[in-house]
Image: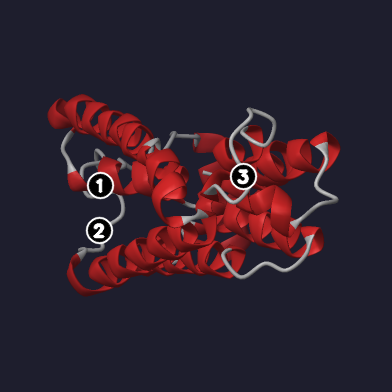
Amino acid sequence: MFSYAYGKHETGFKEGNPIYEITAAFPDLNDFYFSLIGGAEQKIPIAIFSLLAGVYSAKLNRKYFLSVTSILWSIAILFNSQAESINDLQLYMIAFGSFSAVLNPVALSMIRDYFPPNQRSQANAWFSTVIYWGGAFASLSNFATCQFGWRNTYIGSGAIGIALGIFGIAFLENPIEGKYDPPIEAAPLLENPEMDDRLESLVA
């Protein structure tokens, strides 16, 4: 929605159309700031915090880790609707990228423990499909931006995200880690008569 509203500011629409709201609210928002807010300030935090999420997903309750961070990135979206300066936009976009970085590594680790190996490929395929469906539905935000304005569209998106995060806390099951992993067998002890003799001499 952000890129759509920003990208329409020179298309000849009459002033006052909702797609002008961002540039009207932030007259100093030039192409440089837009490239940061619409790209780097989201993607770089995702790249960094995805690695941390992979580490902590093995240490934390993944149900709450995923659900709570979903609520937090949705709150960042809500805050974005109330941004009053370019600095506000940058801060909330960085927060959004940081919290949304948790989704993929944690969700994939949960899928591994939800499904046995013979069903895991299909489960991963469904996960990928849902992501692309989400992207398709996200394009509807362009329509919502024109109909309701970008601030109201952010409010609606954030509210839906918070509701889904609460749903996850209430109904999502935290899987047992390594549920379908093969058991680890103890390595056989190697016989070493010479070492046995030394141990016996020490005990004696």
Q: Is residue 192 left or right of residue 130?
A: right
**Is 197 situated above or below 160?**
above
- Residue 74 drawn at (x, y percent): 47, 63
Q: Tell me the kind of residue under disc 2.
A: Ile
Q: Quick one: 71 or 58, which is closer to the camera?
A: 71
Q: Quick one: 103 or 178, which is closer to the camera?
A: 103
Q: Label 1's element?
A: helix
The residues bearing labels 2 and 3 have C-alpha atoms spaced at a distance of: 26 Å
Specify whether residue 61 is in view: no
Q: Quadrant of residue 66?
A: bottom left
Classed neighbour count for the residue bearing mark 2: other residues with Cα under 10 Å, few (<14), some (14–19), many (≥20): few
Residue at 23%, 25% in the rendered image: 121
Read off the residue under disc 3. Answer: 46
Read off the residue under disc 1. Answer: 113
Read off the residue under disc 2. Answer: 176
Depth check, mark 3 against mark 1: the one in front is 3
**Is 122 situated above or below 163?**
above
- Residue 150 drawn at (x, y percent): 52, 54
Q: Tell me the kind of residue under disc 3.
A: Ile
**Is 132 situated above or below 183?**
above
